């Protein structure tokens, strides 16, 4: 008995995949960058920070080594005191959540971090600290929204 059509088809696909693999290997070997000289491997940077393979034209500027910064640029420190609104608070279980005004993130707080009692939808100030589970609000204080009369 001879091979069925599907067996021939599989055999032809396998042979074609093998041929493609050999062809790709030959292309990689042909475009190999090994053995190039130093001039071929150099890259130049112009005054705008663009890379090129040829040296920039014109007069070059000398740059002090102290002016070169590698890595991320440091951010100015943020104000640690944040404001937000208490979106959820469960007095019996002793925790709640504050929605931060700047980032609109929900921040967890525990009843032990309250300096005064708070209610839901009340505006508060807080600081936040990073924990293993995310950010936690600490030193939570309600903002006095009512003006005080001084008579």
Image (spheres, rainbow, N blue to C red):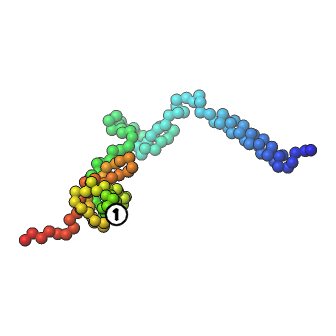
Residue 103 visible, this angle: no
Q: Relative to the observer, which residue lies in front, 48 or 129?
A: 129
Q: Quadrant of residue 113?
A: bottom left
Instruction: Answer left or right for 63 relative to 113.
Output: right
Tag 1 secondary structure: strand
Q: Residue at x 32, y 35 (%)?
A: 66
Q: Quadrant of residue 30?
A: top right
Q: Quadrant of residue 101?
A: bottom left
- Measured as percent of width and height from the top left, residue 49 is found at 43, 44
Q: Residue at x 27, y 54 (%)?
A: 112
Quarter placement of the C terminus: bottom left
Residue 129 visible, this angle: yes
Residue 92 vertical position relative to residue 74 in the rendered view, above or below: below
Q: Residue at x 17, y 69 (%)?
A: 147
Query: According to the image, label 1 marks what residue?
Result: 88
Residue lying at the far right of the rendered structure: 1
Q: Relative to the observer, which residue lies in front, 136 or 89?
A: 89
- Count the marks: how many? 1
Q: Residue at x 38, y 46 (%)?
A: 132
Q: Relative to the observer, which residue lies in front, 97 or 79?
A: 97
- Measured as percent of width and height from the top left, residue 35 is found at 59, 28
């Amino acid at each position: 008995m001879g091979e069925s059509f599907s067996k021939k088809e599989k055999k032809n696909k396998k042979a074609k995949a093998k041929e493609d693999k050999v062809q790709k290997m030959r292309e990689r070997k042909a475009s190999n960058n090994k053995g190039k000289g130093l001039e071929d491997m150099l890259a130049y940077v112009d005054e705008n920070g663009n890379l090129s393979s040829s040296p920039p034209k014109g007069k070059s500027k000398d740059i002090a080594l102290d002016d070169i910064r590698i890595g991320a640029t440091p951010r100015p420190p943020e104000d640690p005191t944040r404001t937000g609104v208490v979106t959820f608070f469960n007095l019996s279980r002793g925790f709640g959540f504050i929605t931060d005004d700047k980032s609109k993130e929900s921040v967890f707080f525990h009843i032990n971090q309250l300096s005064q009692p708070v209610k839901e939808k009340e505006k508060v100030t807080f600081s936040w600290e990073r924990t293993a589970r995310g950010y936690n609000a600490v030193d939570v204080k309600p903002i006095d929204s009512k003006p005080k009369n001084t008579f």
